[in-house]
Image: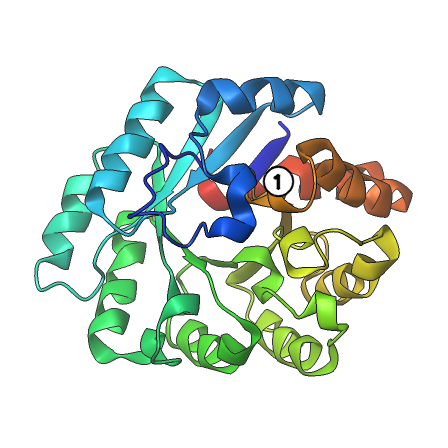
Amino acid sequence: MKIDSHQHFWKFDPIRDSWINDEMKTIQRDFLPPDLLPLLQENGLDGCIAVQSDQSEVENSFQLNNAEQYDFIKGVVGWVDLQAEDIQERLEYYSQFPKLKGFRHVLQGEPQRDFMLRSAFKNGIGLLHKYNFTYDILIFPDQLTYSKELVAAFPDQPFVVDHIAKPYIRDNKIDEWKRDLKALAQFENVSCKISGMVTEADWKKHAPVDFKPYIDAVVESFGTDRIMFGSDWPVCLVAESYAGVFRLVEDYFSTFSQGEQDNFFGNNAVKFYKV
């Protein structure tokens, strides 16, 4: 099964979705399952994982409702207040939904850069494994060292780094990010999504050569058993088409064995999210 491990659906709300600024006008509209399905089919993909873009439990209901209606949505990564006093009750509640695979917090946007190391947040993370939930780590490169400390504290918890931790591709900066990513990858409970790269590059002028050193670093750090394809559609559309994003990694991995390609384009995501 070939899986897009990272994409989003939303009904655009200019207030709630204020992060979609005027530079991103092309995605200031609704993006729903019928919009994605033909793109998956055109690129030979069987399904997707829908990831939260709003930090509310209303978002979970919206994404789960989509997943109930459309079988190609194989899983949902939602949001829950991991610091809440009733977090165990909330996780117990969400455990009834087979397609709710895990949770994510927009750590990249937190003013406190080591927010993930708050005791209340770690308490929530510590409960996820009990309910077989995964956790998506959404960060900028400056938070990689904190992420290392977090994952080290929970060796039985499956984690995945979103968007290769958003390196500064447009500035051609790689050394610190590469070093810190490699240090994080030494923990076997951590995987990485090769996704979101085009939005970290020059939106108007980019080429495959711009991304190769970064993909090289991810593969060197995580191997081919802990990486997965993600389009980051529709966010990617500010810089590239869905087909363009897919072709970028398809070309890169074309020289790898069929088994390694199968792992990257589906098997690893199926295993991680228990699809």
Image vertical order of residue 47 relative to residue 103, above or below = above
Tell me which corner region of the image, top left, top right, bottom left or bottom right, holds residue 125: bottom left
Tell me which corner region of the image, top left, top right, bottom left or bottom right, holds residue 257: top right
- Identify which amino acid the numbered label 1 is placed on: Leu
Q: Can residue 7 be seen in this snapshot? A: no
Mark 1 packing: few (<14 Cα in 10 Å), some, or many (20+)? Answer: some
- Most distant residue in the front direction: 22
Q: Residue 28's spot in the image, x, y percent? A: 46, 39
Q: Nearer the viewer, residue 41 or 89?
A: 41
Indicate the quadrant containing the N terminus: top left, top right, bottom left or bottom right. top right
Q: Residue 256's spot in the image, x, y percent? A: 86, 45
Q: Nearer the viewer, residue 98 or 163?
A: 163
Q: Is residue 159 left or right of residue 90?
A: right
Q: Can residue 91 be seen in this snapshot? A: yes
Question: Badge 1 is on which residue?
Answer: 237
Q: Nearer the viewer, residue 7 or 170?
A: 170
Q: Residue 51's spot in the image, x, y percent? A: 42, 43
* Residue at the spot 28% in from the left edge and 31% down from the top edge: 62
Secondary structure type for disc 1? helix
* Residue at the spot 52% in from the left edge and 42% down from the top edge: 25
Q: Is residue 9 left or right of residue 176?
A: left
Q: Residue 170's spot in the image, x, y percent? A: 72, 66
* Residue at the spot 28% in from the left edge and 52% down from the top edge: 55
* Residue at the spot 64% in from the left edge and 25% down from the top edge: 45
